[in-house]
Image: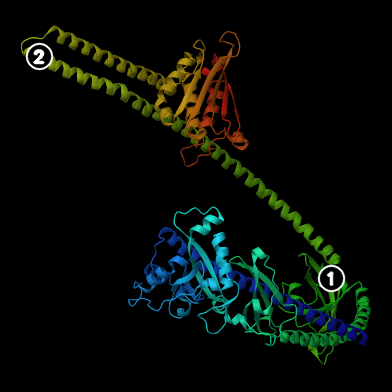
Amino acid sequence: MRAHGYLAFIVGICLTAWACLFALDAQDQRIAELFARDTDKVTQDTDARLKTYFDTLLSIRAVLAVDDQLGRAEFHRYVQELRLQQRYPGFQAIQLVRRVPAAELERHIEKVRRDTSVDPAGYPQYQPHPSTVRDEHYLIEYSEPMKGNENAFGLDLTTFPAHLHALEMGRDSGELVATERVTLVQDASGQPGFIARLPVYRKGAPLATVEQRRAALTAFVAIVFRVSDLMREVIDPQLLRDMHIQINDAGYLSDGGATPPQLNNLMYDSAGRLSADRLRPAVVPGLEAHSTLNVGQRHWLIQFKGYPGGRYGREYETLMLIGGCGFLISTLIAALVVTLQRRREMAVRLRATLEELRALQDSAVVGIGLFSHGHIVRCNRGLEEMLGYPHGVLAGSAVAGLVPARGDDPFQCAAGGQRAYAELELVRRDGASLWCMVNGRMLDPQEPDKGSVWVLADISDRRKTEAALVESRSGLERSLRELAQQKAHAEQAHREMSGMVQTLQQAQASLITSEKMAALGALVAGIAHELNTPIGNSLLTATALADMVTVFERQLADGGVRRSVLDAHLHDAKTACNIIAVSLGKAADLITSFKQVAVDQTSDQRRRFALDGVLRDTLATYAAQLRRANCEVRVDVPASLEFDSYPGSVSQVISNLINNAMLHAFEGRDHGIITITARALDDDPPASGSAELRFADNGVGMNSRTLNQVYDPFFTTKMGQGGSGLGMNIVYNIVTGVLKGTIRIESTPAQGTTVIITLPRQVPQAAAA
């Protein structure tokens, strides 16, 4: 038992040690990444700041390239406008180094001494120094700011080999060249510095070769740095508390730039170590890096080292916290494992005892339960199966769920603890009724709160047998009464159904009549719209003709009319008469078509007619509506196809189909086409022949559900939007009832609809009757 606890403790200690090592490694990795970011930032910031200063030299050289006679005042003003000391205070001075041949030295000195453009007193003390005899001199003529740089004013750089070598390299290459580590003459502290210079050539001179550049050189523009001031501007002082930075000049790139770091080429040391006897500061082992910079044709080596603690220090408090927590957790887990092991052994023994007791209870064929305060505390499997509950669900449930019809608790013994017997009707889980013989006894008469034990035996079969005998007799009597009532109800329903059918037939007839009158009203409106144009034209022409007659009478009364005027008047009158005759002829044709259609649809008289004429008359009455709907009608009907039938019914069918197409077929479309074709199906005489009439549109079509219900009365997909639901029902009744034909419809969604009507060319006499 204790072995498991010791094992858990050892595992916890091992995991704690691993967590500490993992945290230590994560801290080292974080420190290394932070150190790498810091070194990259210092290198990039240094390079960016030097490029900014060097760009300043390029801008000054550009000014001198435009105006090679730039004076001291203009140079002073230009440098002042750059405001470099406020924006980038890391430099010492900006200078103009003049190239002066030995023959022009005296004139140069005199010119500088008399220059009062900046200082009204001039520079009477100006004298090149140190004095030397050479073929040419490189003299510092302008220095901005002058204050603090007086020692450099007039300095002859040819006397310093390091400066002279850098000047000659810049002169020959035309590029910016920096000096090696030098001590600035204007700096009394002796700190390392360097000077970057850019050659300036004579305006317009060729510069293709070294000889041409040497001949054209006139001056240098230079910027002077003290490295400590430059790095103080670049590096955050807070960073120097945790990092050691050292910069060495490895030499010119043309010489290989591989001089090892040593004291005489040390440009900058953040620890202030500029002598060999200074102590080396302690650094973090392995936390070192280096980078390189190309500065004015020279190779700089930057070395970085991290100081222990602070920014690059380990967080030992965290490690101690992890270790302490791990030890405590390991101890608690070990104690918990020992405790759980003991409890598990006790639980196993207790479970075995309970299983034995439960097996004894579940083996009984009756239900046994412990009831207390209206709840089932425990029960055996027999009671659960008797009441239809899964194992374990019945325990803890309320007794009211078993006897919902009773308000009291039937499973309560008398106060004295005597046995109780009763027959109870219980409710199973599925809602079925269950009759049981129950007897119970208190568990402890001295403590009634402990409940009582009840035994339940199923007597449902006996109760069902008794109830069946009583129910069979009452059932026979009830069946006889119900049979008499159903007979009376059936007779009443038959009478009500007959009345409803008669009412529906009357309503359908009224709606069909209304539908016909509505169609006739639509014909009247269309004809009125069509007649408006020819009658209006006739009225306008007649008015114009009257005006022409009045003018002609006035001319005749004034003393005569020339023949040309009479001819013109006769020509205009003839034209007007022709217009009036044509317009009134169109109106007369429309009226004739309307009269024929109206008479046919209202009188419904049988007569011989040409199908082509009936179609033309019907379409004429719908011309205006078809134009407004932008619907084109194509008719292909032989003129020789005649019928002895009911033209009014045929016209009514065509009208309903046109209305149905305009209302349903072209919804959502700006154009539609209706095609009406007809043909004789055989060459027999009209008395026995038949014809096929096809009415097709290229509209939206119908789905199978709509197609199956299209003939049903009152079925419409436009209820409340102009559809009555009787149009196709009327068509079906007319075709099959009046015209003795057949009708079928072919339709596919988005492919249009085709109505195919087959009609006898001579309706049987029985239809006429």
Q: Where residue 377 sits in the image (x, y, percent)?
A: 80, 80
Pick whichever, 202 or 556, lies toward us: 202
Q: Is residue 450 left or right of residue 651?
A: right
Pick whichever, 200 or 30, lies toward us: 200
| Residue type for callout 2 | Gln
CA gap, disc 2 to disc 1? 125 Å
Characterize the local packing of mark 2: few (<14), some (14-19) or many (20 or more) Cα atoms within 10 angstroms: some
Could you tell me which residue is drawn at 80 percent across and 89 percent down? 448
Using the rendered view, name the quadrant where residue 747 is placed: top right
Q: Where residue 198 sits in the image (x, y, percent)?
A: 52, 64
Q: Is residue 566 left or right of residue 691?
A: left
Q: Where residue 268 sits in the image (x, y, percent)?
A: 61, 78
Could you tell me which residue is drawn at 33 percent across and 23 percent down? 531
Give the labeled residue for mark 1. 391
Give the labeled residue for mark 2. 555
Residue 569 in view of the camera: yes
